Amino acid sequence: ATLHPDDQRWLAKQPLPGKTADGRGGDPAAVFDTLRFGDTRKEVEEKLRKSEFVETTINETFFGRLGLNGSFRTRRQIGGLHCELYFDWSPDGGLEEVTLQTQPLGQESYGSSLQDNWSELIEVLTQLHGKALQSGDYPGRDQLKNDLFLASHLWRLDCGGSALLGTSMQADRYLVVVRFTTEKLEPIRRP
């Protein structure tokens, strides 16, 4: 609603991850784009290569050496920034988590481009997964500690897992993170 009308019209024409081109729901078991929890690495790699929403940032011949983590990013910027994809696998080799995160940026970006990315991600995740079960304000930079993720929003996924949105700090640099997990996380209840 806060976007310029021209941007709103353009965005309305773009398919979103988990949605078909006409905006209807895609695969209800999909976590992000067409990825499903339990997909093998080979299935994930094939789906990412065919994706309209992500692109590779390296030559595919290096996947064996470098892996998939950080090798794909969103094709379009979200709130002015691309998000890179990272993966976690179960002991039997199935996809257990997908994480989207921005590149770590300096503190001067925390209240500007990172906050813009966080705000637009709220809109996208709400469009895909409905109203958040729990939502909070943009975390203050002083609330973050190195290597910790501070979630501000929680959504329940149709496939049974959860999606978390928040911010994090790595080596005194800041980033926005979306974590799709098989865990069915519960909102924090306040007395």
Image (cartoon, helix red, strand yellow):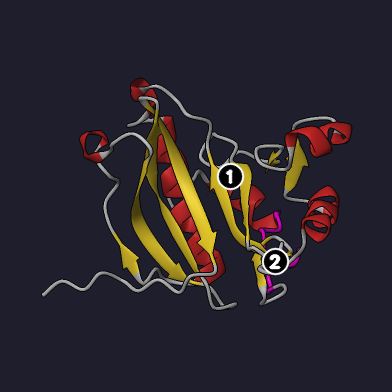
Residue at 30% across, 46% down? 138
Q: Is 155 contained in the magenta span?
A: no
Q: Is residue 87 above or below residue 36?
A: above
The secondary structure that most of the magenta stretch takes on is loop
Is label 1 in a helix, a strand or a loop?
Answer: helix
| Amino acid beneath label 1 | Asp
Q: Tag 2: residue type? A: Asp
Q: Is residue 15 highlighted in magenta? A: yes
Tell me where residue 79 appears, x and y as whole percent.
51, 40
Q: Secondary structure at mark 2?
A: loop
Q: Earlier in the sequence, mark 1 or mark 2?
A: 1
- In this rendering, the answer to whether 153 lies above or below 5 is below
State which quarter of the image contains the N terminus.
bottom left
For discs 1 and 2, the disc positioned in front in the rendered view: 2
Which residues, given as a range, are shown in magenta? 14-25
Side of 65 relative to 69 (left or right): right
Residue 139, percent from left and from top: 27, 44
- Locate residue 43, reporting x and y percent: 82, 60
* Quadrant position of the C terminus in the picture: bottom left
Residue 41 or residue 56, whichever sits in front: 41
Which numbered circle lies on residue 162?
none
Residue under the image location 28 percent in, 38 percent down: 144
Q: Residue at x 48, y 63 (%)?
A: 163
Neighbours of disc 2 within 10 Å: few (<14), some (14-19), many (20+): few
Give the camera-side residue of 82 and 99: 99
Picture quarter containing residue 187?
Answer: bottom left
Q: Which residue lies under the disc numbered 1?
A: 7
Left or right? Give the position of 32 relative to 181. right
User: On the image, numbered disc 2 is attached to which residue?
Assistant: 92
Residue ID at (56%, 67%)? 128
Pick out the residue farthest to the front.
91
* Disc 1 crowd, CA 10 A, few/some/many (<14, 14-19, 20+): few
